[in-house]
Image (cartoon, rainbow, N blue to C red):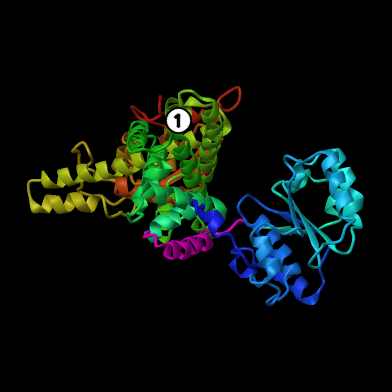
């Protein structure tokens, strides 16, 4: 006998063999046991979820001579006739090629004749949404009041295309996508039965690629086994056959996009394609990776876990900390548009490379999501510069201490940056220029002279707004901080206690900061978002 594909060879023969559709199997078995069989059913769901298989099992069960708990026995003459496709009681019709009014009229004429054997005549109309409007109208009356020995089972992947007059006459059952775990277990069961050696990771990846379809997963398994016939089916072998790449590559590309490293992202793409990866499949898998990161970031690990292993889920959690939700949604949008472009492109690799550069450099776009991603990247750079500035001050202080001539001088220099002194108390410390600081006035003068470098320990927002302030000495230890705009005034007024402490540490004495907003004639200054992200002499705006 000629070779038979796995999905045909292992098509479910009873309700017990149906996987992932327990809610439908239970209802149909109960109807058969209680003799509450309807006259019209509508099976809806995506491809490969078992619609036609369940329809055939139901057709066998209603005519089975010895049913077992509502399921066909597969041993009686009626069951064998259906299995061998020679039963006159089960009529399968492909509505895609028999969608005219005349085809439905033939059915209407045939239902007048009772079955020669068995209890019911079952019509299974596959892809019923392909029927023409006239054919649906011709089916209405027969579907509403068929003879008591006729059952109609309509199967479709697009129930929204079926007229409501048909829907209202049927019992509707929605077939769910089958989970990765259920498909993996079924693949392992069939692999053992077929004598196929396969790694669990390989079967799990095939199940994920099946995208909720048992038939697709079995077809992929058939393809992989044929390529490596007589060998163990490994995870790496599956990736080669399906033109896919390991998930670690997508994690690396994700981090390159988060860091704006376009060169490294293109290197990863080049390595994936050189290893046999398919451009379209790479795009789909990368889109799915971003989707899983988004699910983890939104706190729904279960939606991501349906497509990845436990180890990969941990990597997703780490990557979700690198970018914000807006940036993720922008990347998913760009990749989704890319997949549509790749279908028409004659230079698929070039199109993908351009999209990766666009993801790494949001400055190339001017939409809101790109601007938000650019702002996020700038905020990270500002925070990094603030941290570097604080470390630089510590290095300078350490150099001053190491250059002191005696241990007493080293102790005094260290103490000057760590202890505050009451207002008016003289000290023997030295300011950054080597002058002795003998009074509160000296501390105030030293702070004003070094105003833009004194707040190295402050937070990044404080250092950014520092460029919009101007200090003026007051009485005693008082310093009036004049703010150029309302935003700076509000920030300094809110964080005054923290800024007082930092100023006192630098001056070596208690400092009393007073905040004042000075509005120039003709209204306040316009808010310049670019100037906020510039530090003294260093432009951190990404020109790319």
Could you say where residue 206 lies in the image, as x and y percent from the top left? 46, 53
The structure residue drawn at horizontal position 20% and vertical position 42%, both measured from the top left corner, is: 396
Asked if the stretch drawn in magenta spans residue 188, the answer is yes
The structure residue drawn at horizontal position 92% and vertical position 58%, both measured from the top left corner, is: 145
The front one of 210 and 270 is 210
Asked if the stretch drawn in magenta spans residue 185, the answer is yes
The structure residue drawn at horizontal position 53% and vertical position 45%, both measured from the top left corner, is: 325
Q: Is residue 358 visible?
A: yes
Could you say where residue 366 lies in the image, as x and y percent from the top left? 54, 26
The structure residue drawn at horizontal position 81% and vertical position 74%, both measured from the top left corner, is: 35
Most extreme residue toward the left is 405
Q: Is residue 345 above or below residue 439?
A: above
Majority SS type along the magenta span:
helix
The front one of 349 and 332 is 349
Q: Is residue 300 visible?
A: no
Q: Under tag 1, what secondary structure?
A: helix
Would residue 472 appear left or right of 143 to someone viewing this image?
left
Query: Residue under circle 1?
Result: 352
Q: Is residue 177 above or below residue 223?
A: below
**How many C-alpha atoms fall within 10 Å of the one at disc 1: few (<14), some, or many (≥20)?**
many
The front one of 107 and 410 is 107
Would residue 53 appear left or right of 442 to someone viewing this image?
right
Q: Is residue 175 above or below residue 490?
A: below
Image label count: 1
Q: Within the image, what quadrant is residue 479 found in? A: top left
Would residue 174 appear left or right of 544 to someone viewing this image?
right
Could you say where residue 433 lies in the image, as x and y percent from the top left? 21, 36
**Range of residues picked out in magenta:** 177-198
The front one of 393 and 369 is 369
Could you say where residue 448 lies in the image, as x and y percent from the top left? 35, 36
Q: Within the image, what quadrant is residue 123 found in? A: bottom right
């Amino acid at each position: 006998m000629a070779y038979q594909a796995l999905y045909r060879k292992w098509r479910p023969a009873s309700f017990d063999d149906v996987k992932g559709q327990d809610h439908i199997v239970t209802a149909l078995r109960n109807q058969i046991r209680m003799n509450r069989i309807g006259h019209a059913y509508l099976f809806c769901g995506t491809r490969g979820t078992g619609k036609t298989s369940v329809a055939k099992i139901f057709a066998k069960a209603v005519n089975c001579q010895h049913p077992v708990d509502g399921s066909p026995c597969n041993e009686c003459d009626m069951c064998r006739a259906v299995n061998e496709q020679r039963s006159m009681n089960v009529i399968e019709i492909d509505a895609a090629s028999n969608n005219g009014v005349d085809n439905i009229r033939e059915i209407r004429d045939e239902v007048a004749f009772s079955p020669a054997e068995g209890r019911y005549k079952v019509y299974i109309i596959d892809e019923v949404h392909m029927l023409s409007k006239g054919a649906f109208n011709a089916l209405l009356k027969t579907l509403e009041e068929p003879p008591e020995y006729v059952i109609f089972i309509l199967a479709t992947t697009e129930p929204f295309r079926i007229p409501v007059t048909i829907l209202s006459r049927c019992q509707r059952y929605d077939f769910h996508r089958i989970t990765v775990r259920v498909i993996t277990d079924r693949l392992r069961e069939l692999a053992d039965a077929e004598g196929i050696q396969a790694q669990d990771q390989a079967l799990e990846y095939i199940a994920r690629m099946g995208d909720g379809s048992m038939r697709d997963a079995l077809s992929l398994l058939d393809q992989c086994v044929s390529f490596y016939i007589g060998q163990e089916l490994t995870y790496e072998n599956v990736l080669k056959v399906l033109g896919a790449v390991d998930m670690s590559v997508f994690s690396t590309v994700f981090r390159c996009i988060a860091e704006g490293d376009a060169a490294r992202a293109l290197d990863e793409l080049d390595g994936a394609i050189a290893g046999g990866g398919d451009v379209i499949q790479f795009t789909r898998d990368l889109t799915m990776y971003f989707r899983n990161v988004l699910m983890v970031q939104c706190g729904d690990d279960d939606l991501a876990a349906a497509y990845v292993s436990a180890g990969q889920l941990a990597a997703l959690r780490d990557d979700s900390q690198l970018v914000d939700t807006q940036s993720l949604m922008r990347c998913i949008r760009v990749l989704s548009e890319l997949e549509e472009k790749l279908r028409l492109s004659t230079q698929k690799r070039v199109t993908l490379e351009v999209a990766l550069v666009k993801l790494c450099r949001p400055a190339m776009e001017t939409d809101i999501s790109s601007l938000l991603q650019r702002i996020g990247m700038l905020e990270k750079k500002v925070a990094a510069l603030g941290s570097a500035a604080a470390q630089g001050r510590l290095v300078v202080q350490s150099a001053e201490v190491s250059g002191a001539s005696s241990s007493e001088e080293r102790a005094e220099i260290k103490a000057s940056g760590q202890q505050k002194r009451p207002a008016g108390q003289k000290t023997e410390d030295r300011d950054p220029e080597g002058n002795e600081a003998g009074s509160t006035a000296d501390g105030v003068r030293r702070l004003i002279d070094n105003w833009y470098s004194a707040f190295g320990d402050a937070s990044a927002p404080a250092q950014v707004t520092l460029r919009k302030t101007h200090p003026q000495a007051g009485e005693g230890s008082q310093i009036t901080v004049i703010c150029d705009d309302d935003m700076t005034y509000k920030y300094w007024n809110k964080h005054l206690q923290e800024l007082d402490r930092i100023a006192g540490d630098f001056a070596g004495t208690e400092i009393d900061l007073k905040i004042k907003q000075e509005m120039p004639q003709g209204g306040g200054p316009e808010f310049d978002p670019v100037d906020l992200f510039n530090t003294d002499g260093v432009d951190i705006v990404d020109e790319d």
